[in-house]
Every structure is written in structure tokens, then in C-alpha cells.
Amino acid sequence: MPARCAAFRTRQPAPGTERGAPMTRHLIIGTGVAGVSAAFAIRSVDPVAEIVLIGNEPDKFYSRPGLAYMLTKEIPEKMLFSIQAREFAAQRLSLVNGVVERVDPQGRSIFLRGGQRLDYDRLLFATGATAVMPDLPDIDLKGVVKLDNISDARRIIKLARAGKPAVVVGGGITALELVEGLARRGMNVHYLLRKDRYWGNVLDESESRIIESRLRHEGVTLHFHSDVEALLAKRGAVSGVRLVGGQVLPARLVAFAIGIRPRLSLARSARLEIDRGILVDEFLRTSAPDVYAAGDAAQAYDPNSGRHVLDSLWNPAREQGHTAGLNMAGQPTAYVRKTAFNVTRLAGLTTTIIGTVGGGRDDDLVGIARGDSEVWRDLPHAIACQTHVDVNRVRLMVGERTLVGAIVMGDQTLSQPLQELITEQVDITRVRTALVGANGTLSGVLVDFWKDWRQSRAN
């Protein structure tokens, strides 16, 4: 057994503890935003605990949302690394590069590939999610890619060649990141959608058409009601795709973004309670004692919908990790799920999505997409009202007494007011009629109401 791993098995007395009492040992499986946030939260409460993060990515922490901007050449790779090794060292966080093959909750141990055993007092599953690839022959051909991590982004950049054809398959934000990144690198991009428009479970038809029009302006060819039947190969690399129906598209690169699935194999073998993710209570505790879960792999309770939901948003993963860390360190803290909120860029258009706005299931995805929330997909009991000028567009979902969701495209003036009004569930009865019939004056009605509400809170 390597000396480093052996040291983790032997309980060492914490500096300054009475009579050499053993320090608490926290193991965190996963080095993404949930795992790292948990580690920093534990350290903020417990200055002497042993904290060990285990992961198998050589790059331990980077901004997953930043990969899109790396693909489009807007930021260099080095800017994705917001936490440096010296900061981990300053917090006395141990990093172990390895693959966890088994978790034994009864024995309070985990086992790495190679047989090394690490004991724990408290354990966090921050195992994240992985991109789903279609069940096609030759899926491992050179040139067939996904965008799951920074290694994938590097591989895509290496393969991309200006003037060469590329095919992107899937819906949601990640597919569009791939389309825009490859187009920005000069490739001739064909974008395949199974249905009749882009991201139909979140956007309405007008919003989808705005995005599609902007993609066409960038030279992207869209194929609706299309799917890949077979990958074509030449000398061990992908050379094209054959679509259902027989059409052949040449391709140097074929990218799939058809959804992600939580990594559950470890939790399943440990006999944790699982639905579509690892089920956790309000303190992010799993069904096993002293075992927690956070991030993309956790299925947390949403009080608004009354059910456990999956998120693949950066902020919920960070917040869940932080909350789990506080609880692991002995500071009981309930995870209060905030209103689903994300600011993204769709075909170069800044877009903010808040709360419940969607239209149900998206057939372009086999599961949730990265940068997505299941809450968005809910069919709200609300009336949609909207206003737009060119690409600047606002759509509100107006409930009986509150706003339940909004999409703001282009001009972001209303993003903060809407986020506050929706998150705080402000009673809009006084202006509901005006909002529903506002049309071109919607912005003015909203801003005036929001200012009055803030003033009333200040008094």
C-alpha cells in the first residue's frame, strides 16, 4: 500500500486536541464545485479536521461553465482555474488522485482501485454526472466527442479544423455551446434536432426561432426531425453520419450532447436510497449514517413542487456542497432550495431563465442537460405574457398571486427585478391585470412595482 494512503488509515491526533483525541476525518468523492465547496465549508467550521478529496481528473478544479468560452476562443484555458493548488494547501486539504471502486457504509471505509482502503468519519458523494452517449456501433471512433470536462474540450479543439464539416446532435445549452464553439473555429456545422425546434421544453416557439435565426446567420445548417442512424468511418476515424431516412452528412467531428446522468454506481453498490439521483433530506443526508450527497448526483427536495428534483446548475451544486460541508462539520444547516436561476448565452444572446417556464419533456434529451434544471420543465399554472423588440424579449409566467417564472433575452434590465420578485414570491395582485395586458408597457409596470416593493421593505 502506498505510504500516503496508509497514512490516511492511521488516526493521527489533531494538533492541540486534548489527550491525543483523534481528529474527524472527512472523505469527499469528487473534486468538482460541490466537493470543493464542501471542503472549504468544513474547514471554515473545523480548523483541525482531516479533509481528503478523491478524484480521477488530473485537473482538480476548474469552471465547467467556462468551457464554452474556451471553445469559442474568448478566454484562455488558464482562466478556468479559479482555485490554485496553493489555496488547497493553505486550507490543508489533501487531494488523492484515484478511482473509488467501493464504499462500505457499515465499515465506514472506501476502497480505491488497486485495493487501497481509506476510512472516514463522514463521507460526501459529490460524484457529479456524466454525458450520455448514444448506443451506436463505432461510438469510440476518433472524432466522436462529447463536452463533459476540460479534457473533452482540449480534444475538440485539437480536432477542429476550419473549413471542415462537423455534426452536433442534441438539445439544451451544451449542444449550443458545441455548435457555437465549432462555428467560431471555422467549421461547417450541421446541427441535428429530433423535434421541430430548439430547446422546446424551456423556450417558446418565438424564442426558439430567434436562436435558430441567429445560428443560420452564423452559417450553421439546422436539420429538424433528424437523428443519427449510423456513424461512418475511414481509417479508424469518423468520416460522416447516416441519418434516419438515409441522408449522409460528411463530418470530421461528430459531437453528441443528448443529456447527462448522475453517477450512481457507487451509491447503488453501497445500497443508498436512489431514485433518479441519490435521495437526500433537507440536511443533504443520504439513507446511510454520516453519508451525504451534493451536486449533480444528489436529488434534493424542492418545497415549491413538493418533490425531489435534479439540477445540473453551477450555483445549486455550490450551495449544496457548502451546506453539506457545514452539516458534516457538525453545524446543522438545512438546504433551502432557491428559485432555479441561470444566466447563459444562446447563439450570442444573453438569456436569463428564472423559475418555472417550461413545456415538459424535451425529446432531444434522454435526461437532464448540463446547465439545466428539472424545475424549468414544469408546466406552470400560469398565464404567459410577453413583450419584445427585435431580439430583446421578456416572457413572464404570471400565477394567481405571484410570478412563477421568466425568461429575459437580450437586454437584461429586468433580470434583477424579476429574480427578486419571483424568489421572494411577492404578491403581485395589485398589478396582475396590468402585467397581463401590458404588452409594450410591461417593462415600465414591472420596474415601478419592483421599486415600490423595495421601498416598502426598506421602511
Image (cartoon, rainbow, N blue to C red):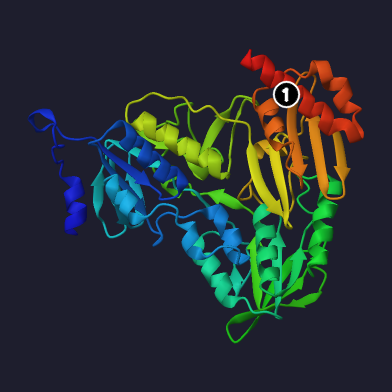
Q: Position of residue 273 (x, y in %)?
A: 47, 35
Q: Position of residue 91 (x, y in %)?
A: 29, 44
Q: Position of residue 131 (x, y in %)?
A: 57, 57
Can you see residue 382? Answer: no
- State which quadrant residue 340 falls in: top right
**Quadrant housing the N terminus:** bottom left
Residue 407 vs residue 367, the one in the foreground: 407
Residue 223 vs residue 188, the one in the foreground: 188
Mark 1 lies on a secondary structure that is helix
- Left or right: 385 with respect to 330? right
Q: Position of residue 421 (x, y in %)?
A: 70, 26
Q: Is residue 225 above or below residue 278?
A: below
- Left or right: 18 with respect to 192? left
The residue positioned farthest toward the bottom in the image shown: 235
Can you identify the residue that label 1 sits on? 451
**Quadrant housing the C terminus:** top right
Looking at the picture, which amino acid does disc 1 mark?
A: Lys
Q: Is residue 443 above or below residue 104?
A: above
Q: How many marks?
A: 1
- State which quadrant residue 204 falls in: top right
The residue positioned farthest toward the left in the image shown: 19
Residue 122 vs residue 384, the one in the foreground: 384
Residue 245 vs residue 61, the one in the foreground: 61
Residue at the (27%, 35%) spot, across then down: 121
Q: Residues within 10 Å of mark 1 (few under 14, many from 20)?
A: few
Residue at the (16%, 34%) spot, across then down: 22
- Left or right: 174 with respect to 6? right
